[in-house]
Image (cartoon, grey):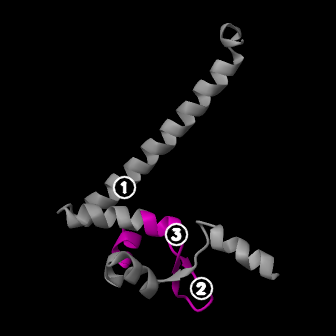
Amino acid sequence: MTAGESFDRLDDDDYPAYTMGRAAEMLGTTQGFLRAVGEARLITPLRSEGGHRRYSRYQLRIAARARELVDQGTPIEAACRIVILEDQLEEAQRINAEYRRAAASEDPTTAG
């Protein structure tokens, strides 16, 4: 791997760069919380060759959203389900917007 390839990973939201300890520290939570959101299948950390959990920035953002809900009194299982549904809704809205753009570009009445 070249130095350039290594630096490219710095911008990759899906690169599993953070250990469980560091991830918990960054989120201001416990390692047990990270294990719990993993057990609830909200996030699935990658495992290093030694079997240690590694988290990406994207996964940390998802876990942080779940933590917000838990801090507001939502049970962890419910918080994880809410985050999953929010993510599904966002994806559906993105796809819907793409379809609308495609339909608008095909509609001859909208051509200038």
Q: Secondary structure at mark 3?
A: helix
| Nearest to viewer (mark 2 / mark 3) | 3
Q: Position of residue 85 (x, y in %)?
A: 38, 48
Residue positioned 35% across, 61% down in the render? 65
From the viewer's perspective, is 102 left or right of 31?
right
The residue wearing badge 3 is: 57
Considering every residue shown, the one lying at the far right of the view is 2
The kind of residue on which mark 3 rests is Arg
- Asked if one can make out residue 29 in the rendered structure from this viewpoint, the answer is yes
Q: Nearer the viewer, residue 29 or 83?
A: 29
Q: What is the magenta range? A: 34-61
Decide: is 22 above or below 112. Answer: below
Question: How far apart are the alpha carbons under marks 2 and 3?
Answer: 16 Å
The kind of residue on which mark 2 rests is Ser
Q: Compare marks 1 and 3 and give the one earlier in the sequence.
A: 3
Q: Nearer the viewer, residue 5 or 84?
A: 5
Residue positioned 58% across, 92% down in the render? 50
Decide: is 87 above or below 45. Answer: above
The residue wearing badge 1 is: 83
The residue wearing badge 2 is: 48
Crowding at mark 1 (Cα within 10 Å: few <14, some 14-19, many 20+): some
Question: How far apart are the alpha carbons under marks 1 and 2?
Answer: 26 Å
- Asked if one can make out residue 1 in the rendered structure from this viewpoint, the answer is no
